[in-house]
Amino acid sequence: MNITEIDSNFKIPDDVQREDLVWHDVRTAPVSIYGLSDPTDASATFHRFPFDVGERVGGKVKDLNLRPAGGRVRFSTDSPYIALLCETYYKIGVMPHMPLSGAQGFDLYRHRDNGETVFVKPFMPPSDRLGEFNFSGIVDLGEEKERSFTLNFPPYGTVRNLWIGLKKGATLSGGIPYRNQLPAVFYGSSITEGACASRPGLTYQAILSKYLNLDFVNLGFAGAAKGEPAFVEYMAGLEMSCFVSDYDHNAPSLEHLQATLPPLYYAVREKNPTLPFVFMSAPGTGGWHRKIRRDYIESVWRDAVKSGDKNVWFVDGYTIFAGDLEDECTVEWCHPNDLGMRKMALALMPVFKKIYGIK
């Protein structure tokens, strides 16, 4: 049975056709690309950090570089419609615990004149594109009117090339700027990378970015971010406005966390003496070991405060899901769903408001 024959709302337009449609390569168009490394390099698949860093680190971190979690395109246009065409590097596939819309889709947000950012449309690979290397979609906006948008990249898909389609003759510019010239950097696990939000705009970093208009870089790696020295060295040298350590989930043991977390903090602090540094423990209370690890992370934060560091923060993951609907915050008692991601964003919100002086 074809569900689209019963309910047309399930039909995703894969063949985008308009007589007046013009495709714009985001690498060369007058748009702004955020959260990715060297995004205008047409010879490379979109990626999150320099390839030579991946060679030094190796393992899964190197392999996950091509997953463009946290990547965004910002632009303004008066086109009455926006189309998308994505060419992937790996075949489009599925995961058991995460929908295609969240793992390999894009989503589009519009910026209102009053400063609000509102969801417009997802661009999702349809199920009949599984095993293929491209998909497309389109959204009609009505009248020709200048609007500003943010298009979020997929956290677990790959993007070899990306085009946006606009009406011939439509205006196109770089979109509105972020509040912070330098991005906040998030380092962590598959949760940090985006599992298991139903859309890329519903990861906890994207929610913070939406409400606070903050640029960020997502360095979350499924099962891979373990405080590797070569990657710590790379991150410490980044130009950034804030650093969030969220890799508790990926440290294989308390002993590993004890061996890697202080060196991570000191490496970042050495090169960035006044940078806001946020220690965050893994969300949820599952497992007796979770609180022990949480207590250790808090102790590292307390030691930093005692040493005179006035720009360190601690976010207690053990309490993030607590209270109403605590048992409904994850897909399988590990990866947050949309509710869990929102609770994570809300836990970080007051810290980020203080860091960036937002009232």
Image: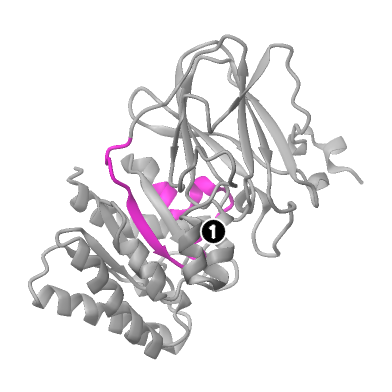
Residue 148 occupies which quadrant of the picture? Answer: top left
Q: Nearer the viewer, residue 176 or 332?
A: 176
Magenta region: which residues? Answer: 178-207
Tell me the kind of residue under disc 1: Asn
Percent x, y of residue 55: 51, 66
Percent x, y of residue 191: 49, 64
Determine whether 85 is above or below 97 in the image: above
Residue 209 occupies which quadrant of the picture? Answer: top left
Determine whether 326 is above or below 113 in the image: below
Instruction: Answer with left or right where residue 266 lies relative to residue 101.
Output: left
Residue in view at x 19 percent, y 52 percent? 354
Residue in view at x 66 percent, y 64 percent? 97
Q: Nearer the viewer, residue 38 or 262?
A: 38
Residue 198 magenta-drawn?
Answer: yes
Instruction: Answer with left or right where residue 64 lies relative to residue 321.
Output: right
Q: Nearer the viewer, residue 24 or 112?
A: 24
Percent x, y of residue 168: 62, 11
Query: What is the quadrant of the C terminus in the image?
Result: top left
**Tag 1 residue:** 65
Q: Is residue 301 visible?
A: yes
Determine whether 327 is above or below 211 in the image: below
Percent x, y of residue 201: 50, 45
For label 1, the crowd category at 10 Å Cα-Cα, with few meaning under 14, some 14 to 19 and many 20 or more, is: many
Furthest-right residue in view? 1
